[in-house]
Image (cartoon, rainbow, N blue to C red):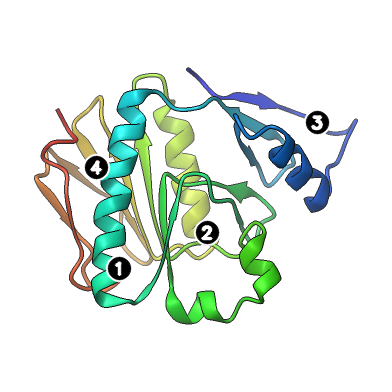
Amino acid sequence: MMPITLNLRPTIELTDEQFALICSTNRDLRLERTATGELVIMPPTGGATGKINSSINAQLWLWNQQYELGEVFDSSTGFKLPNGATRSPDAAWVKKERWERLTLKQQQNFIPLCPDFVIELRWDSDSLLNLQKKMQEYLANGLVLGWLIDLPNNQVEVYQQDYQLEVISNPVSLFGDDILSGFTLEIKNILK
């Protein structure tokens, strides 16, 4: 099912607290807020999406347990980006030192930073252009590495600071390189 975008301006401009309240009273929906204040309503995921998200998050979590370099977050976590948008990537990771600089209150609310690493999944029902814009938004807000896994096209777009976009067709594995030292995402069973 396609996300729905509601343009609230100029009628309503939600504060961070109001947006958080809307999210908490509508837990069946994944909500994001764009930098211009639009609400993006994403319905709960289907079984295939949930299965793949679980696999990705499990692999990232297991690697992080071994190396203890940061914190792993699932698709229900909101990140308040420096540009004012609140986004929820399918998987995210934040370096330990950045996470530990946050206060307990900041850790408990929408996290006020851009993750160091994100993964976004694209299905047939998702707009590739919208997800590419979202990945560019992450980069503009401090993302170090991001993978857009494009399931319909059996490819992965790699977004990285100071590098040109790389597109990998039919990859078996993806490597975290210097950012996620020692991390390998096995995706041979994901891109089918």
Whichever of labels 4 and 3 marks the residue nearer the N terminus, that label is 3
Q: Is residue 94 above or below residue 6?
A: below
Q: Residues within 10 Å of mark 1 (few under 14, many from 20)?
A: some
The answer to whether residue 112 is visible is: no
CA distance separating discs 1 and 2: 25 Å
Instruction: Check disc 1 and report the residue beneath it.
Output: 64
Q: Amino acid at mark 3?
A: Leu
Q: How many marks?
A: 4
2 vs 27, left or right, is left
Q: Which mark is residue 140?
A: 2
Identify residue for label 4: 156
The residue tagged 3 is: 8
Name the kind of residue labelled 4 in the image. Answer: Val
- In the picture, the quarter occupied by the C terminus is top left
Which structural element holds mark 4? strand
Residue at the location (63% across, 32% down)?
40
Q: Nearer the viewer, mark 1 or mark 4?
A: 1
